[in-house]
Image: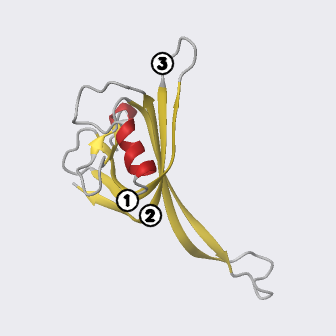
Amino acid sequence: MAIFNGTDLILKVSPSAGGTDAKLMHSQSVSLDVSMDTIDITTKDSSGRQELLAGLTSFSLSSDGLMDFNPTTAANTEFDELFVQGYTNRTAVTFTFTLASTSSGDYTFSGSGIITALSVSGGVEDAPTYSVSIQGSGALTKNDI
């Protein structure tokens, strides 16, 4: 079992429809959540025990990081690109949930989703931060490297 530093886990998002996934700039945390609904099929013949069937699966991603209003690199996805794609254009983004550096035997998760929330905040004497939430649409794919 290979344990790694959580700093190496990143979320890459395509800043434009059909574009190439790029790392979210200055991210501090990333999260991938996968869930499954259940369908209750309990009957009087279930001997007092609940019985379930698997239902719809879903997934969501989130990330937060430090806000940069004056980005200096085009190699990363910036907050303003997420704003244009998710809010202005109202179109799905593609993403890859991965390690920063992958090697043989590693895997990634990829798919597409809708940006459901974007926020920017800044407190007194504090670094400004952003957060983004993405609700998955369609399949979440595991890709072996």
Q: In which quarter of the image is the N terminus?
A: top left
- Decide: is 142 above or below 73: below
Image coords of residue 43 (percent x, y): 76, 85
Classify mark 3: helix, strand or loop.
Answer: loop
Question: For the point 38% across and 50% down, which residue is it?
Answer: 85
The one nearer the camera, 83 or 54, is 83
In percent of width and height, residue 123 lies at: 57, 19
Which amino acid, mark 2?
Ser
Q: Position of residue 6 (x, y in %)?
A: 39, 34
Give the quadrant of residue 80. Answer: top left
Q: Which residue lies furthest to the bottom in this view?
A: 45
Label 3, residues with CA under 10 Å away: few <14, some 14-19, many ≥20:
few
Query: How many angstroms separate mark 3 from mark 1 (CA)?
Result: 30 Å
Neighbor class of circle 2 (other Cα within 10 Å; few <14, some 14-19, many 20+) is some
Kindly identify the amino acid type of the residue bearing the numbered disc 3. Answer: Ala
- Residue 52: give x, y in percent of width and height: 65, 76
Residue at 23 percent of width and 29 percent of height: 73
Task: Identify the amino acid type marked 1.
Answer: Ser
Q: Does the CB distance between marks 2 and 1 fall below 8 Å? A: yes
For disc 2, the marked residue is 137
Q: In this view, does 49 lie above or below 137?
A: below
Residue at mark 1: 112
Quarter of the image for residue 38 reads: bottom right
Q: Which of 89 and 42 is in front in this view?
A: 89
Name the residue at the front extreme: 88
Q: In the displayed image of the protein, which residue is found farthest to the top?
A: 125
* Residue found 23% across the figure and 39% down from its top: 101
Instruction: Tell me: 130 left or right of 26.
Output: right
| Quadrant location, the C terminus | bottom left
Per the rendering, the mark at residue 127 is 3
Q: Quadrant of residue 65?
A: top left
